[in-house]
Amino acid sequence: MGTLKKEGELASRALQGVKAVIELLDGPVKHVLCSTQRTVKLTYRLLLSRFSKNSEKRKEKSRDAARCRRSKESEIFTELSQQLPLPENVACQLDKASVMRLAISYLRLREILEPMAEVAKSADCSPYDSSVLEALDAVLLVLSAEGEIVFLSGNVGRHLGLNQNVLQTCFLATQKILRRWI
């Protein structure tokens, strides 16, 4: 890009120089210089066209690369949302920020619950399942030591009228205030 621009500037300067000389001369020499002027003009136009074609090709390549990156990113987020333990109708409606937030919450939940699972296996406890929540007609809310929502049961919508995602997002917004109280 830099060399083409420099060549274009040189051609422009040469054209100006040739014009100045032609104005000073007369006769057959002027005819020869006029053809030189045309050659310089053609060279200048050729350089400009090469520069603009390269620029357009570069822009097109950049657009294609960006489109490809966005496509790959979208595929990754779709795959990640399908791996989350969510109902199909909820997972397909999530935006990228929600997918990331829920994936992080899921990993935190696993981090908290894995040691408990080891204790439960050694103590010969019965495993927890969702039927307990249904039988109690209750909502399960798990908070981390920092006061962040790690898990919120799916039946919260039936009790509060809002789905899990909305409540977790609202809770994140008010979390700083709640930390002051805790």
Image (cartoon, helix red, strand yellow):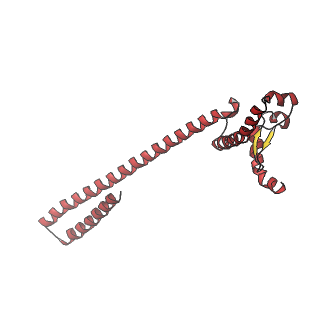
Return the residue nearer the eye: 178 or 29: 178
Return the residue nearer the eye: 32 or 176: 176
In the figure, 54 relative to 73: above or below? below
Residue 70, percent across and down?
Answer: 53, 42
Which of the 4 image quadrants contains residue 103?
Answer: top right
Taking the view exactly as shown, the residue that stands out farthest to the front is: 122
Residue depicted at x 81% and y 27% = 131
Residue depicted at x 87% and y 30% = 136
In the figure, 5 relative to 20: above or below? above
The N terminus: image quadrant: bottom left
The C terminus: image quadrant: bottom right
Residue 143, percent across and down?
Answer: 78, 45
Question: Relative to 30, is 162 on the left or the right?
Answer: right
Residue 119, percent across and down?
Answer: 76, 36
In the figure, 136 relative to 53: above or below? above
Residue 146, percent across and down?
Answer: 76, 51
